[in-house]
Image (cartoon, rainbow, N blue to C red):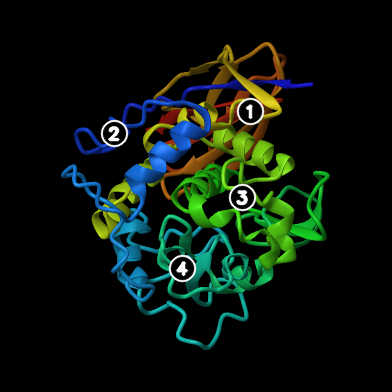
Amino acid sequence: MKQIYFALTLLISSFTFAQIPAGYYDSATGSGYTLKSQLETIIDDVNDSNGLPFHDTSVTYGDLWSLYETSDVRTDGKVWEMYSDCDFTFVTDQDNGTGGGDECDKFNREHSFPRSWFGDDGGHPIFADPFHVIPSDKKVNGIRGNLAYGEVASSNYTSLNGSKRGTSSITGPTGNVFEPADEFKGDIARGYFYLAVRYQDDIGSWEANDSDGDSMLDGSDNKVFEQWALDMLFSWHMNDPVSQKELDRQEAVFAHQDNRNPFIDNPQYVQDIWENELSVIEFNQPINITLYPNPVTFNTFHITTTTDLDIKIYNVLGKLVLEHKVTHNDDDVDISNLNNGIYLVKIKSKNQSITKKLIRQ
């Protein structure tokens, strides 16, 4: 029986829009797996002789270090990695084969779809594809190893940004799983949906390469994921909408290798392709919330609500700076410890979430 899943639209006026080339998605007219194949044709490495860009696979694994300086740079110039909470400096702190025994010592290149899952084939385009090869803390990368992504019931390791390794709270995975921090779950999910499209001609044959990969992959080239994994990735995609970080990264990667992640440009493609397979259905039903005053000139703002809410506030670097619970009897949020600036307030109620911009003056 399908559960109802409530989706919300994130609208932040400061966001810039994706710079999609004219006509890039014109041939994506189908639905279901027909649409999936159409998108593969658009983003693969075959020249379709239509004047549109296609995946340039001449770029190398070594080229990623310099790419990260534009694709994964925070506003303070430091490395924007998703597994820990560090202030890495480009070049100086990149992995040179030593160190990394502690968090925030070195950063390296993390295959979010582990190398063993695709046979560690260094000649395959997936090996150096930055849509899934991301900068990460070396220590936490090692902690994750080749584990499947999942949701942790009991943690045996928690990183500085709240990423966790431990037993699975979802029936399906074998052994331990790795759960990224909430604010990056959508990034990871959209990366996996990209891989399911870009490499659909190969991914169906990779299931048996690794036991952890086997727990997520179903051995097909259309559905690609086991049911638990597909539902989880979809929920991550919906609960953590496309951010400005992802939009900026999309343009940097596009400049690097001439293809795009369709699910960043058009998040609806996920449901258009896998709707008949999902155990959840999306409906647009926004949470009835008012946040005031905004901008905030004192130490408190208020959120009007008829239900209990979990509040997480992030600074512009993506760092979690405040957590709070709001009820209809207590709607005050104390931000006296926050400096003046712009923040993102993620508001969650059961299976609904929305993100709003907050300005503190």
Residue type at mark 3 is Ala
CA gap between label 1 and label 3 equals 15 Å
For residue 34, side relative to residue 26 (left or right): right
Residue type at mark 4 is Phe
Name the residue rendered at 28%, 48% in the picture: 251
For residue 85, which quarter of the picture?
bottom right
The residue to which callout 4 is attached is: 127
Number of marks = 4
The residue to which callout 1 is attached is: 348
CA gap between label 3 and label 2 equals 25 Å
Residue type at mark 1 is Lys
The residue to which callout 2 is attached is: 17
For residue 77, side relative to residue 270 (left or right): left
For residue 174, side relative to residue 192 (left or right): right
Name the residue rendered at 28%, 35% in the picture: 16
Mark 2 lies on a secondary structure that is loop
Residue type at mark 2 is Phe
Image location (x, y in percent) of residue 106: 50, 76
Q: Sequence order check: which comes first, mark 2 or mark 4?
A: 2
